[in-house]
């Protein structure tokens, strides 16, 4: 069973050894129903940024299209099993929206000088909660993720699943997941959910 109540405590333990004021955690919140290649490549990209010491993918706890938070979490784990990255950690939101986890973390950890929040360009520009975050917590900086992975969408991935088209579906999973057999596991899981 997952313990969702201590996300902030777990994260702060990872940060205790950091001394650079510009170094901090990066939160990557989203629905991830389901997580796809673009999401995974984004998380990997964030780990390459010099001032990010850990990427916390925060999955919405809302069920959408029949996909639960636990399903999304398990898919992320399949991707990480195929391509391990100790700088990426997946958490399920304890709040009504994952951005509230970031608010709570920032509020409880005001001594951390820099907290990053990642979003696609249209989210960063069009959703007011990033402005509210930065206004309330000057330590928070938004990272706009480059659209370098094509315009992969969960909608297209769900359509491939719904049609039962594995050849189309495999375009939407990370290459490592496909190469190591995780794509078939994810496809099997999702075809039971999305009809």
Image (cartoon, grey):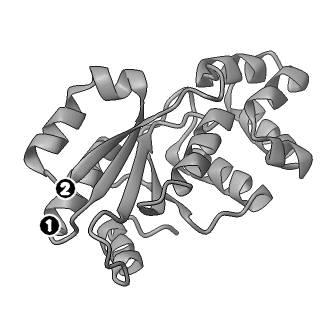
For numbered disc 1, what is the local secondary structure? Answer: loop
**Is residue 60 something one can see in this rendering?**
no
Q: Percent x, y for residue 177? A: 81, 47
Find residue 56 and report its image quarter: bottom left
Residue 103 lies, with reference to residue 7, above or below; the image says above
At which x and y percent is residue 7? 36, 66
Q: Is residue 25 visible?
A: yes
Circles 1 and 2, Cβ within 8 Å, touching? The answer is yes
Say what secondary structure mark 2 lies in.
Answer: loop
Q: Which of the two discs, 1 and 2, labels the residue nearer the N terminus?
A: 1
Instruction: Give the residue at mark 1.
Output: 110
103 relative to 15 in the view: left or right: left
Q: 66 above or below 25?
A: above
Q: How many marks?
A: 2
Q: Nearer the viewer, mark 1 or mark 2?
A: 2
What residue is shown at x 63% (from left), y 50% (from top)?
A: 76
Q: In the displayed orientation, state which residue is furthest to the bottom.
A: 17
Q: Which residue occupies the foreground of this view, 31 or 23?
A: 23
Residue 139: numbered disc: 2
Is 17 left, or right, of 71 in this rendering? left
Crowd tier of the residue under label 1, counting other residues whose Cα lies within 10 Å: few below 14, some 14–19, many 20 or above: few
Q: Position of residue 190 (x, y in %)?
A: 72, 35
Taking the spot 76% from the left edge, 24% from the top edge, the residue there is: 161
Which residue occupies 65% across, 29% down?
149
Residue 28 is labelled as: none
């Amino acid at each position: 069973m997952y313990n969702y109540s201590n996300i902030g405590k777990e994260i702060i333990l990872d940060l205790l050894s950091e001394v650079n004021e510009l170094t901090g955690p990066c939160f990557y919140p989203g629905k991830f129903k389901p997580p796809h290649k673009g999401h995974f490549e984004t998380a990997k990209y964030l780990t390459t940024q010099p001032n990010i010491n850990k990427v916390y993918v925060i999955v919405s706890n809302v069920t959408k299209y029949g996909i639960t938070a636990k399903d999304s979490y398990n898919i992320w784990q399949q991707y990480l099993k195929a391509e391990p990255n100790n700088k990426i950690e997946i958490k399920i939101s304890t709040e009504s929206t994952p951005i509230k986890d970031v608010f709570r973390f920032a509020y409880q950890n005001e001594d951390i000088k820099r907290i990053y929040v990642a979003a696609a360009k249209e989210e960063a520009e069009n959703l007011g909660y990033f402005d509210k975050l930065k206004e309330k917590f000057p330590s928070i900086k938004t990272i706009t993720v480059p659209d370098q992975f094509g315009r992969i969408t969960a909608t297209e991935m769900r359509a491939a699943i719904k049609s039962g088209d594995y050849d189309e579906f495999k375009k939407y999973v990370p290459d490592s997941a496909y190469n190591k057999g995780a794509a078939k596991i994810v496809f099997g899981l999702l075809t039971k959910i999305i009809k």
